[in-house]
Image (cartoon, coloured by chain):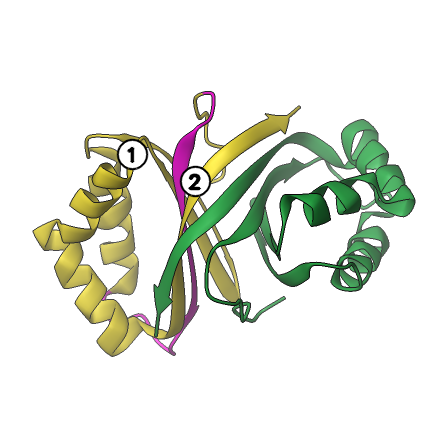
Chain colours: A green, B yellow
């Protein structure tokens, strides 16, 4: 991810996922790639932005809270979440937000 | 910034700032440090998270839309915004969001 997501006119939703990794890969890289590809196939997906520099920040954009719920409950994503909690992340935070205004250049 | 922000129980607000840099520093590093320190002094500031990996993502957290407006209009920050547009960023996006739900581990 090294592009700014092209999102529609607000309102829409953003999930801000911030995390700190444990040491070592333990299958993380492959799963992260798979989750990015899978998220992009979900109904209501609008875009994603991601960067890690010690702290990792991934922001995914969605057209509804229902789309966010469905993605959270996707079976492959559930497996990834479980491995995230048990193995890959020493700490993480998920914030569900409504985008009210947007501008840029 | 390599910590997850310790934010209060929602609702509160998040500003998602994503950017792509131009080549060279041109005073960016010093100004970025100054803006982080200055933001943290503003009324209503709750925390900040930042990472750059090609794409830069900075998420700042605030207790109200008024606090976000005040910070946007702060004179030193206005100068930084102008240099951002003219010199430091090839593209950027600012998204003002309301945090509705939060969880983590």
Q: Residue at image x 80%, y 54%?
A: A35
Answer whether residue B95 is visible to the viewer in this image.
no
Q: Residue furthest top?
A: B9
Q: Where does the image place residue B66, in percent across and percent down from the top left?
A: 21, 39
Q: Nearer the viewer, residue B23 or A40?
A: A40
Answer whether residue A75 is visible to the viewer in this image.
yes
Residue A12 sits above or below residue B105 on the image: below
- SS for callout 1: loop
Quadrant in the rendering for residue B32:
bottom left
Q: In the image, which residues are magenta?
A: B9-27
User: Which chain contains the residue that carries disc 1?
Assistant: B
Q: Is residue A85 left or right of residue A98?
A: right
Residue B64 is marked as 1
- SS for callout 2: strand
Q: Where does the image place residue B33, in percent across and percent down from the top left?
A: 28, 49
User: Which chain contains the residue that carries disc 2?
Assistant: B
At label 2, counting other C-alpha atoms closer than 10 Å, the crowd grade (few under 14, some 14-19, many 20 or more) is many
Q: Residue at image x 12%, y 49%?
A: B74
Considering the image in quadrants, where does the C terminus of chain B appear?
top right
Q: Residue at image x 57%, y 39%?
A: A96
Mark 1 to mark 2: distance in Å?
9 Å
Number of numbered discs overlaid on the protein picture: 2
Q: Where does the image place residue A16, in percent across and percent down from the top left?
A: 56, 44
Quadrant in the rendering for residue B94:
bottom left
Q: Nearer the viewer, residue B96 or A93?
A: B96
Residue A13 sits above or below residue A90 on the image: below
Q: Give the residue pinned by disc 2.
A: B98
Q: Residue at image x 46%, y 59%?
A: A10
At label 1, counting other C-alpha atoms closer than 10 Å, the crowd grade (few under 14, some 14-19, many 20 or more) is some
- Residue B15 falls inside the magenta stretch: yes
Q: Where does the image place residue B101, in percent across and percent down from the top left?
A: 56, 30
């Amino acid at each position: 991810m090294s592009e700014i997501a092209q999102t529609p006119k607000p309102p829409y939703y953003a999930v801000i996922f911030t995390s700190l990794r444990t040491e070592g890969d333990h299958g993380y890289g492959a799963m992260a790639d798979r989750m990015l590809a899978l998220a992009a196939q979900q109904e209501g997906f609008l875009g994603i932005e991601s960067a890690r520099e010690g702290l990792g920040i991934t922001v995914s954009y969605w057209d509804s809270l229902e789309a966010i719920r469905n993605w959270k409950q996707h079976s492959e994503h559930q497996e990834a979440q479980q491995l995230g909690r048990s193995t890959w992340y020493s700490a993480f935070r998920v914030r569900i937000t409504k985008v009210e205004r947007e501008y840029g250049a």
